[in-house]
Image (cartoon, rainbow, N blue to C red):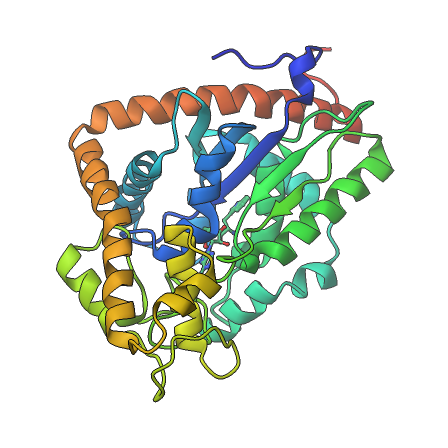
Amino acid sequence: MSLPSSTSSAATTPRVLSGIQPTADSFHLGNYLGAVRQWVALQETHETFYCIVDLHAITVEHDPALLRGRTKVAAAQLLAMGVDPERSTLFVQSHVPEHAELAWVLGCLTGFGEAGRMTQFKDKSAKQGAAAATVGLFTYPILQAADILLYSPEPGPGERVFHVPVGEDQRQHLELTRTLAQRFNHRFGDTFVAPEAYIPEGAAKITDLQEPTAKMSKSASSPQGIVDVLEEPGPMRKKIMRAVTDTGSEVRYDEENKAGVTNLLRVFSALSGTPIPDLEKRYEGTGYGQFKKDLAEAVLDTFTPIRERALALLDDEKQLDLTLARGAERAGEVAARTMELVRDRVGFVGRGR
Ligand code: TYM
């Protein structure tokens, strides 16, 4: 696949960039429905860049051997879920050093107070205790802005579409990215297209099976609260059957009074394509048991083939490495072009000129 040159008409092809952290042994149901499913669909219409963000993964204490393994497992899962390396540029963030370089430049445009208002930083640092939170965790959203803006289409006449498919929890980081793009453009001339968050309507925030008012999360959920993509079918089914509902028996969408059932309805609807009112009607009078049983089947139907494909891909590590190397090469070309422009715009002297 050839890359669009800076002057070709392909510069107007709508673009997408998104990223995911390799911080667990498996992605979960929220990652899939909130983000990766959209990544796969957008390959049809957009020029797509997907990044495994290992630099972000070290903003909290980590084990190097685990990170290495999880980065490969992340790649295998993305491919198994349908990210197609012939159509998408799938790469590892640390393979493209421009991410860290642009993050530095953007960091110099970000106010200290502005970064301090990021709610994910506030939550994570509160959990770890302020003294344990690192500067890397503080500047995490700036690195995320760099991940995105490196792949910005070039601004110019006509519409430039630049989407970032993410779950609801990333909305604030996307706002910061837009602000930084506009600020850079204002100070140094038109360079970036401000990206738009692409957040799915029904599945923007999948919640914890045991704590249905909290987000399903790699770092915060208990093992019983989270459905891992790579989980064995038996335990997966059990978790869904044991999901917290309420003392009633009505399968009804009611966020305030029936958070657990509402979450399960959202998941079921997203997986099956059946509108929620139709599901409510189907399970009228049946109680939660049948509803959960059918939902478990829908989850297993989705994840069993993904798990099998991911395990097969992990059996051929050489091929996996090759796929990521190719992705890094393609991403690197785009990133190098953007960074060259950025260096020039901010006034860095070119090498050997
Ligand atoms: P991460 O790895 O935490 O999550 C990956 C994606 O999954 C979405 N997600 C959810 N969606 C719905 N319900 C949930 N319970 C749920 N949990 C997670 C996240 O919104 C995300 O889209 N900061 C990013 C990683 C990142 C990135 C980027 C994203 C780094 N650079 C550039 C986009 C563009 C993150 O924490 O992902």
Seen in the picture, residue 193 relative to 294 is either above or below; the reply is above
Q: Position of residue 332 (x, y in %)?
A: 52, 23
The C terminus lies in which quarter of the figure?
Answer: top right
Question: Please, is residue 136 above or below residue 258 in the view?
Answer: above
Q: Which residue is drawn at the image coordinates 69% and 39% (left, top)?
A: 105
Q: Position of residue 70 (x, y in %)?
A: 29, 45
The residue located at (28%, 47%) in the rendering is: 302
Q: How many marks?
A: 0
Q: Position of residue 163 (x, y in %)?
A: 62, 39
Q: Is residue 216 visible?
A: no
Residue found farthest to the bottom: 247
Q: Is residue 313 left or right of residue 30?
A: left
Classify residue 5 by image quadrant: top right
Percent position of residue 99, x then y: 56, 36
Q: Nearer the viewer, residue 109 or 251?
A: 251
Q: Which sits in the foreground, 175 or 64?
A: 175
- Quarter of the image for residue 344 reads top right
Q: From the viewer's perspective, tell me whether residue 134 is left or right of residue 309.
A: right
Looking at the image, residue 348 sits to the left or right of residue 121; the answer is right
What residue sits 23% from the left and 66% below the top? Answer: 293
Q: Residue at x 31, y 21 (%)?
A: 322
Q: Nearer the viewer, residue 92 or 252?
A: 252
> Can residue 128 be seen from the camera position used here?
yes
Q: Is residue 263 above or below residue 37?
A: below
Q: Write down the quadrant of residue 341 in the picture.
A: top right
